[in-house]
Image: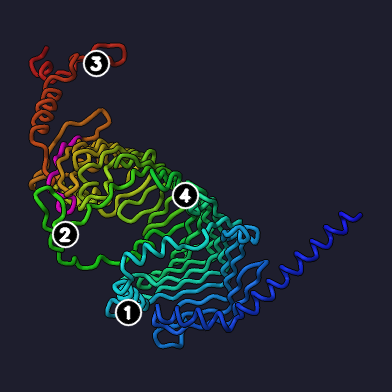
Amino acid sequence: MKKLKLLGIIAAVIVLILSGLSVAVKSYLKSDKLKALIIPKIEETTGRKVNIGEINVSLFKGIVIKDMNLKEQDGKTDFVAAKAFVLDYSLAALLKKQIMITKIELDSPSIKVVKNIDGSYNFSDIVDKTKAAKKEEKPAKEKKEEKKSEGMPLSIIADTVSIKNALAEFVDKTKSLPDIKANADITASLAPGVGGKPELAKGLVDIKSLHLDNKGIKTQTSGKIEIKKTDISFNLNTSVDNQKVNASGSVSNFQTAPNVILNLYSKELDLEKLMALTPAKSEKTAAAPKKAETKKGAPADGKKPDAKPMKITANGELKVDSAKYQAYNFKDFYLKYKYANKSFVIEPVKMKFAGGDAVQAAGDINGDFKFMLDPDSKDMAGLIKKTLTGKTNINLTKGQIKKSSIAETIATVTGLQELRNPNFDETKINAVIKDEKTAIDGLIRGPLMKASPTGTVTFDKALDMKTDLKLAPELASKMRIGGGSLGFLKDAEGWTSVPITIKGTTDKPDVKPDTAALGKGALKGLKQKLFGSDSGQTQQSGETKSTNPLKGLFGK
């Protein structure tokens, strides 16, 4: 009993001592005294007016600072503000001459950054003042002496570092950058890393709203970003002029060799609207003069060359349930991609479509593509154009060619206006892309015409194609080339073959009869007319009948 009594007395004494210390701390570190110490220091450093509502210090809990703000240069509006800043520490560690912070909380912080017309920012004066202060820093000897007499070691082991209801705004008066407004909650956990320095263990960014206004193009995003020690995962919903897209995925090893998985999905898109929202290209600025280099290849200013870029890999997929572009309707659009070693591969890409303006039809497209994508390239578009390879298959069902320079030229050359806007029952086109041109092998079949185009179209629109144009009997009789009618080889069904070449460009095609093929066809047709079929005979009613017209001529 005596021992328990003694322990009780000791405990009571400890409580009294700690209570006394707490009272002493509060009386010594009163809010007004602390503000008188802190505010002038911040104002001297920033050159701005500072307001702090209240500072509460508790020996057992920590520090709470309420209603603080750093004003703009006008001294009226807020540049940076927060409702409260809470910092908790470990009393046990403090008694061991260590400052161990266990909790950091920031309530409703806000910041507004403005880019002025002259290119400066609303914090440029603070930066200038900081630079001027650095020039007046203490000599190196005094700094060494200060390091020797450093105070208690600081470590941060915070279960939660939280920023609630954070508001950030950026306004560009020059209109060269988008205006941004963001509202988010941020929570994070820190753990001691190498040398006791705090490292991020995990974190969560809850984006309540992220608004971007780029020259009238308004984008709104919400979603969550989860951060772990080496990985990031995200799920974001973005709306651009009511065009909604979901982006989900992850980034692993983001500090060393990032591997990005990005999947995009949209239920419905209007591609024409999205393209119209894309800002027009600004005029090219004058090229900056190249930096002089030393003989060894290092910049003449003595600065170290940029660090070697990180190796990045990426993969994912894009899905769109339905999309519109002008008069075309697309469904079930899907592509899968991967990027590694500067190579971008899309395999497969597929979609169904219907409608159309130049060509009205329904069908599907399947293909795959590959090209080089180098972030350091000075001509990204040129690199893609030069290295693009791939193949695609286009299958169309019943439709009509409504606008085609090639069809119009063929109609003019043949004198058949029916070929200007021909109807077709089936179209199949196989295309192979390589060496900055597309090799085409196709089939078009309609009620009045058939064609089997083959050849190439370069990326500069140059044409080098041939096709065996077959015309129905009712069209062939009306065909005129060079002001006269021509008789060409007919098949068993009475369809006439007209071989043609297509040169020029897609905008200005040059369509002519294929004279080489015409010669062969004419000779073959003449042979059939004079000598009949290859066997010289056909079976009719069980009898052998000669088809050679010369036989009857000579009575044999």
Task: Check whether the beta carbons of the residues at disc 2 and disc 4 lie within 8 A of each other.
Answer: no
Query: Of label 3 and label 1, which has the lower sequence position?
Result: 1
Q: Of 104 and 57, which appears nearest the observer?
A: 57
- Name the residue type under label 3: Thr
Q: Residues under labels 2 and 3: Cα distance?
A: 93 Å
Residue 127 in picture, x, y percent from top left: 34, 74
- Tag 3 residue: 538
Q: Residues under labels 2 and 1: Cα distance?
A: 30 Å
Query: Of label 2 and label 4, which has the lower sequence position?
Result: 4
- Name the residue type under label 4: Gly
Q: Of 438 and 410, which appears nearest the observer?
A: 438
Instruction: Choose mark 2 or mark 1, whichever is in front.
Output: 2
Residue 82 in picture, x, y percent from top left: 54, 75
Name the quarter where the C terminus is drawn.
top left
Which residue is located at x 34 percent, y 43 percent?
311
Q: Is residue 425 above or below residue 421?
A: above
- Tag 4 residue: 195
Task: Check whether the beta carbons of the residues at disc 3 and disc 1 lie within 8 A of each other.
Answer: no
- Tag 2 residue: 301
Instruction: Please tell me whether mark 2 sits on a helix, a strand or a loop.
Output: loop
Q: Residues under labels 4 and 3: Cα distance?
A: 100 Å
Q: Residues under labels 3 and 1: Cα distance?
A: 93 Å
Q: Which residues are magenta?
A: 497-508
Instruction: Choose mark 2 or mark 4, whichever is in front.
Output: 4
Instruction: Please tell me whether mark 4 sits on a helix, a strand or a loop.
Output: helix
